[in-house]
Amino acid sequence: MRILPLLCALLLLMLQGAAGLSLARGSPQDCERRGGFCSHGSCPPGIGRVGICSEQDFCCRRRWYP
């Protein structure tokens, strides 16, 4: 029975983290503040989507590889 509260806490943390993975809708200014740029349709190769600027524009940012 002692493990049940730990499992509930772990589940809550996992769900909370998954919510942060969704694409954030914002303005072009928000995108630039995050170090990205708006691209119409899709992001160029090697560039990842980090948000949405408008209905048809995605916020793109270069992927960082350590």
Image (cartoon, grey):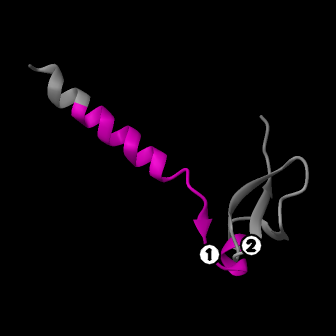
Which range of residues does the magenta coloring cover? 8-32
Q: Quarter of the image for the C terminus: give it.
A: top right
Q: Residue at x 88, y 46 (%)?
A: 46
Q: Is residue 58 magenta?
A: no
Q: Secondary structure at mark 1?
A: loop
**Which quarter of the picture shows residue 29?**
bottom right
Is the residue marked by circle 1 packed among few (<14), some (14-19), or many (20+) residues within 10 Å?
some
Label 1 and label 2: CA atoms lie apart by 10 Å
Q: Which residue is mark 2?
A: 32
Mark identifier at residue 46: none
Q: Are marks 1 and 2 in contact (CB under 8 Å)?
A: no
Q: Is residue 66 above or below residue 24?
A: above
* Badge 2 amino acid: Glu
Q: Is residue 4 left or right of residue 64?
A: left
* Badge 1 amino acid: Gly
Is the residue marked by circle 2 packed among few (<14), some (14-19), or many (20+) residues within 10 Å?
some
Percent x, y of residue 49:
73, 56
Q: Residue lying furthest right in this view?
A: 45
Q: Which residue is mark 1?
A: 26
Q: Is residue 21 left or right of residue 49?
A: left
Percent x, y of residue 58:
75, 66
Q: Earlier in the sequence, mark 1 or mark 2?
A: 1
Please state which of residues 17 and 40 is positioned toward the viewer in this rendering: 40
Type of secondary structure dominating the magenta stretch = helix
Please state which of residues 63 and 40 is positioned toward the viewer in this rendering: 40
Q: Is residue 21 magenta?
A: yes
Residue depth check, mark 1 versus mark 2: number of the one nearer the observer: 1
